[in-house]
Image (tube, helix red, strand yellow):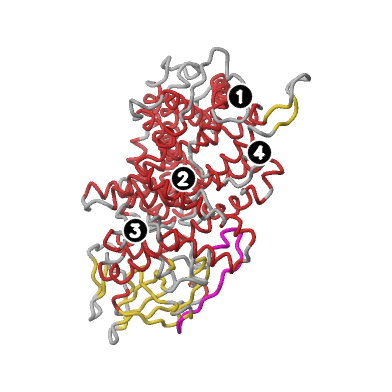
Amino acid sequence: MSTDTAAPASAPGYAEPEVDVPALTALLDGRYAEVRQLVRTNLATYASVLDDAEDLDVDAFRERVRDVVVEMAATGQTGMGFPEEYGGGGDIGASIAAFETLAFGDLSVLVKVGVQFGLFGGAILQLGTKRHHDAYLQDLVTGRLMGCFAMTETGHGSNVQALGTVATYDVATREFVITTHGDAARKDYIGNAAKHAEVAVVFAQLEVGGRSEGVHAFVVPIREGGAVLDGVRVEDDGLKMGLNGVDNGRLWFDGVRVPREALLNRFADVSPAGVYESSIENPNRRFFTMLGTLVQGRVCVGGAGINASKVALTIATRYAVRRRQFEAASDTEEQVLLDYGMHQRRLLPLIARTYALHFAQDVVRTQLHDVFSSTPDAALEATRRELEGRAAGTKALGTWHATRTIQECREACGGAGYLAVNRFAALKADTDVFTTFEGDNHVLLQLVAKGLLTDYASEFEDMDQLGMVRFVTNLAVGTVIERTSAHKLLERVKDLLPGGDEWDQEAGLLDSEYQLAMLRFREEHMLSGVARRLKRGVDQGRNPGVVFSEVQDHVIGAANAHVERLVLEAFVDRLRDLPADAPEGNRVALALLCDLFALSTIEADRAWFMEHGRLTVQRSKSISREVNALCRKIRPLAVDLVDAWGVPVEMLRSPDLV
């Protein structure tokens, strides 16, 4: 153990496992251990940027962040997802792993990397064709060409299909004319736009021959030699809650002309004569196919939130085994914080949930790598649809987890946690936006629910509520209700419980099949309830939009339950797949964490389970007792478990806390 203070025995007769920290780190790093170690080395090299965030003014800090990003690019860290012929590493999964690990450090650097190489570079790579790759990729991979991703507009937020910027094709000059129609259509919150970007990928409504063809993406120069080009207006968004090393800005376009070849034309093109062509006939399917190629951003943000949580928990856990307060008895010295049951309750379930989300993120990253590294076919299309839902749900749970965890850890460190040097101020401020960028979490969970309510996720009409309700009620509700009938669900779960009909048996709480069955029941019961409510309202002739609005909380609840079940499945699967030579102490420690995650998840929603007859009062109390017991068993392992995440010591900063 690496604790500074010896921990008390967890329970009479309990043999405490010994954690092999390097072996556990290797397990967590997985196939990308070398990539993650490169990032850790770079973080240690540029550790001074954490001080710069507090000491420099905004303009100077922005320049410092830009310099760090370009210097990191020279190590190959940021270009791993791009083709080798353009200076990249040719490995999408490696690029995600590198980005996740970068979240251990200053998050302005992280977001600047995400904007430049993930959003801007990813759009050109995934939406463009060879002509765009040849023109831009090599320079953007090195950071010689800085760009931005101009999708979001002030007046439309998540409703991308309603964007107000228009690109009209001028057949006489073979150019697109980009125009911002009113302030509601200005591009807003655009990273890199206020100062550094020379080129923007602009999303706009394409008009050809007087007809709208929907939203498409265009490469539009906005600066040359640092000077803003004619027809482009740029405004700085100013100070933000955090991430002030990133130059977010607003963009307007007043009849800006770009050549026909500026259209990113992987999925659609316009001929010189002004004929619109696309291999995807359905405009809505075309739109969602285009957005689906950008799912990497959601995967990255979710992973970043999970890893930011690791930083907070590492600091808080290490502090909790050093800081003493009050005596347990009159003849003893003051106890360390982590020996208190409440302190264990505050931190240890969060450690367990972080491990669970780490393994869930592994699944999403692997799926994304497979989808973007394979030749498209029917089977891959089904995997892509599954990926979109998993990415949306994991991003939502991972970033909400970061917000909750960082706050809890800050409080758990008392006044020391309030000092800027101890990182919580920056972690709180910089991660807060994670819950809303790359998709507002509630909107993303609605996307998850859509996929659950029908097997035809790629056929959704649009992102608005009315379109969802019409589609669900016309095509999917009957199937969902049949698939999730309450009787069938009850029988499925009963089969997994000891004692058959007896739901209050204490045996089986630590059985992963029981735990999974409980979460499956909740998910499918909630999903069935949503479908029934939607169908009943529409059958009564009520306005579908009103009906959906009334059940929106149930929609979000069903999606959340689905993702929590996927997270537990990922943890259970990882335990089952541990290599035969895995250290036994690590195997035991991970099993304890898995049980703690599962039971604390059930405990947190015990009211629902009791309302629906899945928990008696007696069994609910048994779960709470078991959660406490698991915390006592994990307490002596806590520092080893957070050390295994491999947060560089330079990123922990304060000797007072660590």
Q: Sequence order check: which comes first, mark 4 or mark 2?
A: 4
Specify the farthest residue to the right: 330
The region drawn magenta spans 229-245
How far apart in space, not on screen, are marks 3 and 4 (Cα)?
Answer: 43 Å
Instruction: Identify residue for label 3.
Output: 288
Mark 4 surroundings: few (<14), some (14-19) or many (≥20) residues within 10 A: many
Is residue 235 on the magenta stretch?
A: yes
Instruction: Identify residue for label 2.
Output: 555
Give the secondary structure at mark 3: helix
| Badge 2 amino acid | Val
Q: Residue at x 53, y 35 (%)?
A: 351
Relative vertical location of residue 529 with respect to residue 424 in this rendering, above or below: above
How far apart in space, not on screen, are marks 1 and 2 (Cα)?
Answer: 44 Å
Mark 2 surroundings: few (<14), some (14-19) or many (≥20) residues within 10 A: many
Residue 412 circle label: 4
How far apart in space, not on screen, are marks 2 and 3 (Cα)?
Answer: 21 Å
Give the secondary structure at mark 4: helix
Q: Residue at x 55, y 62 (%)?
A: 245
From the image, state whether disc 4 or disc 1 is nearer to you. Answer: 1
Give 325 or 492, whichever is nearer the viewer. 325
Question: Quadrant location of the N terminus?
Answer: top right
Q: Sequence order check: which comes first, mark 3 or mark 4?
A: 3
Instruction: Identify residue for label 1.
Output: 7
Q: Sequence order check: which comes first, mark 4 or mark 1?
A: 1
Percent x, y of residue 561: 46, 38
How far apart in space, not on screen, are marks 1 and 3 (Cα)?
Answer: 53 Å
Q: Sequence order check: which comes first, mark 1 or mark 3?
A: 1
| Badge 3 amino acid | Phe
Q: Sequence order check: which comes first, mark 1 or mark 2?
A: 1
